[in-house]
Amino acid sequence: MTTIQRVRYIGKPLVFAVCLVPAFLVVGDLFGITGTLGANPVEEILDRFGNWGLRFMMIALAVTPLRVLTGYNWIGGFRRMLGLFAAFYVFMHFLVWLVLDQGIYLPGILEDIVERPFITIGMIALLLLGAMAATSTAGMRRRLGRQWQRLHYGAYVAAILGVWHYWWQVKADILEPAIYAAILALLLGFRLWKKLTRRSLPMRRSAVPAAQTGS
Ligand code: HEM
């Protein structure tokens, strides 16, 4: 088996299954099978999906630095899937807010988006993630050419907005959003350092099709 086949037939299905665990745990806890959602289930589900959305954004952004630092180009093959899981969890977070928190009541939704700046920021990040998810296929990458790369730089903006969104809504203890901010600073700092030192990232040889990688 070649590396690309191992990634495609073993690595990807395995990572896919692991990425679904947080969602299954929410469902399991909802029915009291794996645990409980506590006294305020809606807030608990909202928070869990939001946290996993942010975690997957960080994990997806860590793929390129890991690939460059280790020299294992096959790691790049997981980036698209991890990015899509980030979008999935953020979308679920949004759906919980829309349906369970707001009851799809339009005036309340619009008031929240306009009057609570952390929600406005979250919405912008969600729209960016949606645009990237919709154009993440190899066909769209080919069709959009240079525009695709520009659009997908949106991942950095969405991650900054995601951390900002979290930071803005915490009341007292800023430790957790500060940890995310530090991780994000490292991940973006690595890219900036690469750019400034003009060291081009190593070529992704044959291990993974170009359409599934990128920086
Ligand atoms: C990239 C986009 C987003 C990310 C990464 C994200 C992430 C998070 C995180 C990590 C939290 C804190 C959870 C906790 O306290 O443990 C949170 C809270 C919250 N998010 Fe988002 N979010 C995003 C977009 C949105 C959107 C689009 C909405 C709704 C329009 C939204 C609504 C909320 C609300 C209402 C809370 C507060 C929950 C509470 O009071 O406990 N978020 N989000």
Image: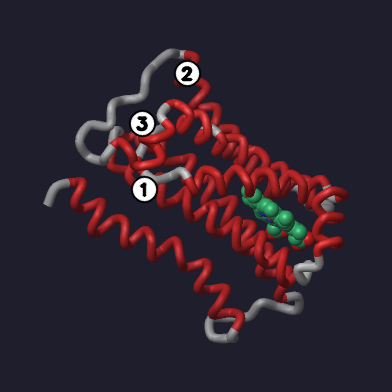
Identity of the amino acid at label 2? Lys
| Earlier residue among tags 2 and 3 | 3
Colour mode?
Answer: secondary structure
**How far across and down, in percent of the image, does residue 56 sit?**
52, 51
Q: What type is the residue that disc 1 sits on?
A: Phe
Callout 2–callout 3 Cβ contact below 8 Å: no
Position of residue 141 measured from the top left corner of the image (x, y, whole percent): 39, 37
Label 1: element kind: helix
Residue at the extreme bottom of the image, as rendered? 32
Other-residue count near label 1 (Cα within 10 Å), few / some / many at <14 / 14–19 / ≥20: many
Q: Position of residue 164 (x, y in %)?
A: 72, 42
For image coordinates 68% across by 65% down, the residue present is 46
Q: In which quadrant of the rendered image does the C terminus lie?
A: top left
Q: Visible in this render: residue 175?
A: no
Point out which mark residue 68 bears: 3
Pick whichever, 79 or 211, lies toward us. Answer: 211
Q: Nearer the viewer, residue 188 or 204?
A: 204
Tell me if 169 is positioned left or right of 53 in this view: right
Point out residue 22 in the picture as x, y percentages from the top left corner: 52, 67
Is 100 left or right of 36, judged from the image as shown?
right
> Which numbered marker is on residue 195?
2
Q: Which residue is mark 1?
A: 78
